[in-house]
Image (cartoon, grey):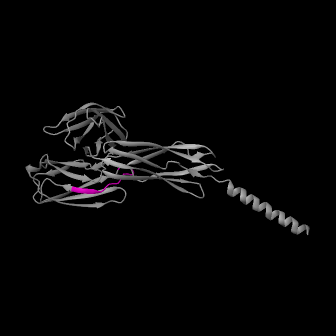
Amino acid sequence: MPTIFVLALSLIGAALCTSAAEVAAPQIQCQAATYDFGSRDASETVEHTFILKNTGAADLEIKKVQPACGCTTAELDKNIIPPGDSAKIAAKLSLAGRTGELQKPINIESNDPTNPTLQLLIKGIVGADFQITPSTMMIRKDSPEAPASASVIVKSLKNEPFEILTSRSESGKLKIRWDKLPDENAFQVTANLEDRYELGQYGDKITLETNHPTRKQLEVSVLVLVPAPISVAPSKIVLHQDAKSPISRTIVLKYPPNSPFTIDKIETPDPSMTSQSEPMGDFGIRFVIGNIHPTAALAGQSVKIHISTGQVIQVPMELKKKP
C-alpha cells in the first residue's frame, strides 16, 4: 500500500507540473493586425506602427520579422516581451511603381505554441494622379569620392497644372533642382551627390512641396549605389599597326569581393570582330576579342563590356608601331 500511495502522489505531482507548464506559455496578440491606408498616391511611402502584446504567462520571444518584399520594411523595438507587456513594429511601405489594390503581409514568427506565425497586413489602393519615371531614382557613384547625379520625370496624369515650390532630401546630402518640361504638366527632377560614400547601397528620399490642390507633397525614392571597383587587365588593348593578319587580344575582369556578376553584352568598335567569354571560377571572367585588323580607324575606340550591375566597362584601344 505505501508503494502504491507514493506512486499515486508522484503521478498527481507530474500531472500538476505538466498542467502548470502548459498554462505558463506566451501568447501573441495584435488587436489591429490589418492596416488599411485608404487611397494614396504612388509617390508616397505609407508608415504605420503595429502593437504586439503578450497576453500569456511566459516571456514572448519574437524570432523573426519577415516583410513580403523589398518594398516593405519593419523594425521591431524589442524581441523579448514579458507577460502583459507590448512591443512596437514600425512598418514602411513604398508605393513607388504600384497602382490599384495592394496588399503586403508581414510575418511575425514567435515562440507562441498555439500561434507560431502571426501575419500582419498593410493594404489599400494606390492612385495614379502622378507618375514618377523611373519609379526609383538610382544614383550610381563610380567610386566613393566621385560625384554623381540622376533624374526622374514627375508628371500629372490628369493633366492638371502644378508647380514645385521647394524640395528636401531625407539625408540632407542631395542637391536638388527641377526643370519644367515644355508643353507638359511635368518636371524633370535632378539630384546631384558630391559627398563621399563608402562601398554599398544607401536609401534616401526626396520630398517635393507643390501647389497642387490635393497633392501638396510628392515623394521620390532614391537608391545610392557605390559598387566595388572591378579590376581590368590589361587596362588598354595595344595593337601594332603593321600586323599583317587579324590578331586577337585577351581581357580579364576580376570580380570584386563577394560581388560576382554576369555579362549582358560586349560591343566592339568593328562589327567584324568576334568576342568569346568564359568564367574563371570565383576569380572572374576571361574575354578573347578576335579578328582584329589594326587600322588607324581603331585609334581611340574602345571595347565596351556591359555587365549585370548596370556598369559599362570600357577598354580603350591604342595603336603603336613596332620599334
- Location of residue 145 in the rendering, given as x and y in whole percent from the top left corner: 32, 36
Residue numbers of the magenta segment: 256-265
The vertical placement of 77 against 165, above or below, is: below
- Figure label count: 0
x and y percent of residue 12 in the render? 80, 62
In this picture, is 225 found above or below 254?
Answer: above
Q: Residue furthest top?
A: 166
Q: Is residue 55 magenta?
A: no
Quadrant of residue 292 within the rendered picture: bottom left
Q: Is residue 245 left or right of residue 177?
A: left
Q: Quadrant of residue 15?
A: bottom right
What residue is drawn where x is 27% and y is 46%? Answer: 128
What residue is rendered at 9% in x and 58% in y? 244
Q: Residue furthest right?
A: 1
Q: Quadrant of the N terminus?
A: bottom right
Secondary structure, magenta segment, majority class: loop
Residue 263 painted magenta: yes
- Residue 237 percent coordinates (x, y): 19, 50
Relative vertical location of residue 3 with respect to residue 235 in this rendering, above or below: below
| Residue 323 seen in render | no
Q: Can residue 192 be seen in the rendering of this structure? A: yes
Front residue of 13 and 63: 13
Q: Which residue is the extreme one toward the left?
A: 296
* x, y percent for residue 65: 49, 50
Q: Is residue 168 left or right of residue 248?
A: right
Residue at 72 percent of width and 59 percent of height: 19
**In the foreground, 231 or 102:** 102
Is 128 positioned to the left or the right of 71 in the image?
A: left
